Amino acid sequence: MPVSTSIPRLTAAALLAGLPLIPSAFGAERVRVETFDQSQAAYAVETGGEFPGAAVTLAWDKAGETTPGALAIGYDFTKGGQYVGWYYSGFMPAPAGQLAFAVRSDRAVALLVRLLDATGQTHQYTPAVPANARWQVVTIPLAAASAPGRFWGGKNDGVLHFPLVKILIGVEKAGEPVQGTLLVDDMSFTTTATPAELAQQQADYYWRNATVAIQTQRPGNLFYPDEPVTGDLAMTPHPLGAEFTGTAEVFDIEGKPAATLPGLKLNRNNHYRATLNLPRTPGFYRVAVTLTGDGHTQNSESRYAVIPANRELARKDPASPFGVNTHFNQGWPADLGAIAKRAGIAWIRDGEASLEDRAVAVARANQLCYLPCFTAYTTTALNHRDAKGGWDFTAIAAWHRQYAEKYGKDIDAYDLMNEPASAWSAVLGGGWWGGPWLESFVIYGRQVTQALKQGDPGCTVLWEDVDQLLWYKRFQQLGAGDTIDAISPHPYNLHRSAPLPEDQPILRQYAEFREFTRRHQLTWPLWLGEIGFSSYDMGEPPPMFYSPSTEAEQAQFLVRMMVLHLAAGVQRIFWYDLRNDGWERHNPEHNFGLIRTDSLPKPAVVAYANLSHRLTGCRWLGSYAIGGNAQAVAAACRQGAAPTLIAWLRQGAKSEAIPVASDAQSLTVTDIYGRSRSLPVVNHLAELPLSASPIYIDGLTLDDLQPYLQTAAPTGN
């Protein structure tokens, strides 16, 4: 948006060129900060999410108040909601005596204005705007000692604490459901700040908000090897056209230099953009940029990766074992679906499934298999008693049938309910390990599963277990054996005493589970609905659950975990989750993602892309006996192709020799980021460079491996 800005040490004349100053009758200058003279698509909107149903659109209208251009806020309350609006977070002078802006509306509206001050306190105003075909000026007094009608958050004292941080201008629902358009133009403030003070404020604002980023045309900055690996280095335009020069340095996952790109220039002539030609060797990369100009140095870091081309996944692949958890029904932008697809991930599991399911459209657009997870009735189900005190889930079952009838053609499996233990046991007794609540839950589960199958005949319905396999025996005893299509535990490493993938207790339970299902003639495959490792830093006090890991360790754990569980016969695995849920470094829940909150890649998404590319459709041959504390698993990954050995150490790094009975003169070793090198075979021995980061070894024959293999688990379970 066209925000007036200036730079340090500006003269008054230069300031006047950047900030229009309008004489005011209040003994102060009026500073115009937004005129909407140019069309801009990237405005921040507010839909009043605590009151669902409202819709808002933002557009540029060429008919302004005093100069061409205005913002058109289209509002629609016909389906509910209470308010909508547009957020302004550009430059705002301090102190400010009055906020003014022009509006035009073809009908009377209840205007909504919210000011967020420096303490995080929100101040709300609701001036009335009568219907008028002409522009009207709305003024809001900003006397620091006056209290508006409503305020909350921050200091919560009703006093405006400058500088202001954000302004919301919008429309409240009034009376009958309405829809219309509000035009907004020419936002300004009065201020007693001197020109020199305003110049310094503008300089501070610019340097506080100036950004440098590498923008690409690839989802998540994930490139395929045969594509041009280029990106635009873009900087926030300098208000007076200063030039910046600098260098970009590219580093690989170990922090080793991969390229230096000197001689960068960003200026008004190139619109503060410069094209970078980046290394295209497979791997994960960080790009550190240093730009200097106008007496300042601006440092920035970005990321990209070169991953295997997964174009063969142009259609849905229900047979793929590789999935990821997403939150599209909780507000994630739909374009994140393209990142999962590009990484070769075939399935998404999304919570809060509803009759207005947002994840369905994402799955359809990206040809992803979809596993909806139901959470809405986790607690409300416990309130449905019939007249005799028994359970009556009729309405809930009907809702699930309606969902299946509406979306069944786009659904590949259903998750009965997300982690029901806490809510159900709190009412009925028992806990995480099971107990009395399971009896009522099985009644619920049978009715809902039947309803889903009525709405979507032949569908697959998963019943969850916990971080270990603890509930499935009771399910069978209570009569759900012929109802359940798959068991879906969530086997996180909850406790720091067992931080490694190899320590997950569920790995030792698989043999017992297979024996139980064989004995009771149950065809229950295992789908791991949630599993993951968080790349967080330990803080004080330490969190209750989860071990911290670096981003590189998270990538290593992902591969080790996936290989161990799939080789043990697990049918599907859904990593938790696709994107980080926040920026707090000490919060485990914020750091499970394959990509960061800004959608830039983490090493884990690169490791997952290489894993899915190599191991989709593979046949697991079994574990391979290797020396020391190393672990290795063999798989036949392509029809008729030689096998692949995946090997690693639990901790540390050392070489281990393996015998090569064939006449192979060399093997190919590829790391989890797709970087390959040749490994010589000397006297029928190959020295494997093992570490905690797995490697893929190609070039061995089945005869090389067979004497050292232990048979893999049956893949049916």
Image (spheres, rainbow, N blue to C red):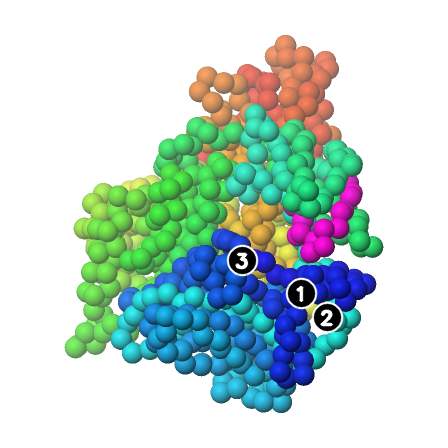
* Badge 2 amino acid: Leu
Above or below residue 59? Residue 632 is above
Seen from the viewer's position, the closer of residues 162 and 225 is: 162
- Decide if residue 116 is in sight here: yes
Q: Residue furthest left?
A: 387
At 49% from the left edge and 87% from the top edge, which residue is drawn?
149
* Side of 212 where 325 appears, left or right: left
Above or below residue 74? Residue 615 is above
**C-alpha separation, residue under disc 1 versus residue under disc 3:** 14 Å
Q: Which mark is residue 171?
A: none
Which element carries disc 1, helix, strand or loop?
loop
Q: Are marks 1 and 2 in contact (CB under 8 Å)?
A: yes
* Mark 1 nearby-residue class (10 Å; few <14, some 14–19, many ≥20): many
- Residue at numbered disc 3: 37
* Badge 1 amino acid: Leu
Magenta region? 234-249
Q: Are marks 2 and 3 in contact (CB under 8 Å)?
A: no
At 57% from the left edge and 64% from the top edge, which residue is drawn?
34
Q: Quadrant of residue 229?
A: top right
- Residue at numbered disc 2: 198
- Residue at numbered disc 1: 19
**C-alpha separation, residue under disc 1 versus residue under disc 2:** 9 Å
For marks 2 and 3, the one nearer the N-term is: 3
User: x, y (%) of residue 715?
Assistant: 40, 34
User: x, y (%) of residue 281?
Assistant: 65, 28
